[in-house]
Image (cartoon, rainbow, N blue to C red):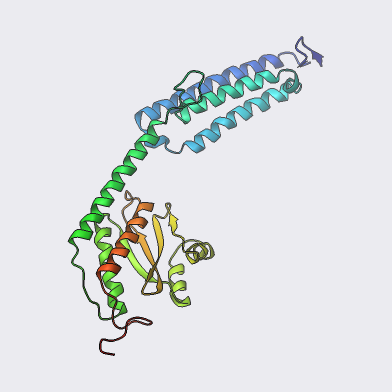
Amino acid sequence: MRRNNYGSRKSEFPGEEEHVEKFFIVGMWVIFALLSFYIFVYWRNREAVKDKDTIRKTWYLLYVLGALVYLTGNPNSLFTSWQNYLVVLIGFIVVDSLIFLSIYVSKLGGNELQIPGEQIERTENYWISASGKVENMELVLNSYEYMRYTRDEEEYINELDNFLNEFGEKESLFIDVLPYHTEKTKDELLESIQRPKSKVERILDTGKTYFSPKDNLMLLPIFVLEKSYIAKVTTEIEDIEIQNIDGNIINILLMTYVLAVEKPYHYEGGVEHEGE
């Protein structure tokens, strides 16, 4: 092996550097073609390239692959020409920011960045959805015919279930009020969830809401008649997304129900009979 003027080793095999140069030229054209294809597909149908994380991982994998190929032919270049690797890495980061993350500089020399258009659109859609949910909640609160009295605990819970589903129907949601105050009722609920039982139980036992966007499922702990219940929120419509605000609205509806409907005369630990 012999060294060139830059300190890196020259190959003793004639034509090896030429092959490496051809490899990088072809590689650059392949990368250009892939980026062009990505931009074209993104322009025609954004949903088709929705999973950007995988594409970004592939993008940086190409950088590592190129660096390894060059290092294989020129091992000393990592120490003698490290600036070249740095320049290429910066180029990859810039392309990643502009194309995959949709970030662009709004101030020359400043740190402020514009919010990507997709994020603005998602935020607007969320507020529109939240506003609609609040309007439906107000409609239910003002139009529902509250049952003033209930005969027993079962009727009280059933009426609460009906009340919550008045809101659920308007949002294409199913809201089930399920008991969660005995080992049997806990096991029955947890067995119906296709998730690690211990994880779900640990979250619910601390009084926190279990929320699974992937399963479109929410389990909201509530306290009714001095007992623990779970408001199970589900939907069968794929386009409907259960949101955290649904849990907040359910809590507001529950508080209204407790104030509007008197507790039944017959419930454990409750009110005594009239005249006693």
Left or right of residue 219, residue 30 in this image: right
Q: Residue furthest bottom?
A: 276
User: For residue 234, what is the image quadrant?
Assistant: bottom left
Q: Is residue 58 above or below residue 231?
A: above
Compare residues 42 and 269 and report the one nearer the observer.
269
Residue at x-position 55% and y-position 33%: 58
Q: Residue at x 51, y 28 (%)?
A: 96
When the figure is inspected, residue 8 is found, relative to residue 193, above or below; the finding is above
Quarter occupied by the N terminus: top right
Quarter that holds the C terminus: bottom left
- In the displayed structure, 10 sits above or below 97; it is above
- Residue 27, given in percent of the width and then of the height, sits at 57, 22
Farthest residue to the right: give it. Answer: 1
Instruction: For residue 10, say whether it is visible.
Output: no
Can residue 262 be seen here? The reply is yes
Name which residue lies at 49% across and 66% down. 205
Vertical side of 139 occupied by 28: above or below: above
Q: Is residue 24 left or right of residue 199?
A: right
In-front residue for pair 194/145:
145
**Residue 3 x %, y %:** 80, 13
The mark total stands at: 0
Instruction: Please provide percent x and percent y for residue 53.
Output: 50, 38
Nearer-the-camera pick, 23 or 133: 133
Residue at the extreme front? 275
Residue drawn at point x = 63 percent, y = 25 percent:
66
- The spot of residue 221 in percent (x, y) is 41, 65
Q: Quadrant of residue 198?
A: bottom right
Please indicate whether residue 87 sits to the left or right of residue 248 in the image.
right
